[in-house]
Amino acid sequence: ALALQERLYGPDDVRLALTLNELGQLARYSAPLEARRLLERSLELNRAAHGDEHGDTAVVLANLGGVELRARRYPQALE
């Protein structure tokens, strides 16, 4: 799904952010480093399109915080 969206919309389109977030959620237990990478990319797209105060940005930040907590990276989870 992600590869198709990237071809359709380009790699920097905010429409990819939801897919990246969902894939990050799926990977958070089995591949936490990949989850972090996916969520950080989703966060970048949301911030660029909506800013820091938007609900979509907040959801991704919360999910990224959960990945950091699970990895016991407490200072990063609070950022």
Image (spheres, helix red, strand yellow):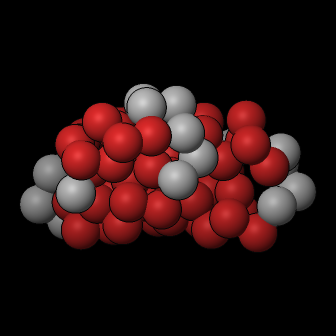
Q: State the image coordinates of residue 56 (x, y, percent, origin top left).
A: 68, 65
Query: Image quadrant of residue 67?
Result: bottom left
Q: Is residue 53 left or right of residue 62?
A: right
Q: Residue at x 69, y 57 (%)?
A: 57
Q: Quadrant of the N terminus?
A: bottom left
Q: Residue furthest right?
A: 53
Q: Is residue 78 left or right of residue 76?
A: right
Q: Camera-side residue: 76 or 63?
A: 63
Q: Residue furthest left?
A: 30
Q: Residue at x 66, y 47 (%)?
A: 46
Q: Residue at x 11, y 60 (%)?
A: 30
Q: Residue furthest front?
A: 8
Query: Image quadrant of residue 36?
Result: top left
Q: Is residue 61 above or below residue 46?
A: below
Q: State the image coordinates of residue 53 (x, y, percent, origin top left).
A: 88, 57
Taking the image as drawn, is residue 77 in sight? no
Q: Is residue 66 left or right of residue 2?
A: right
Q: State the image coordinates of residue 10 (x, y, percent, origin top left).
A: 43, 31
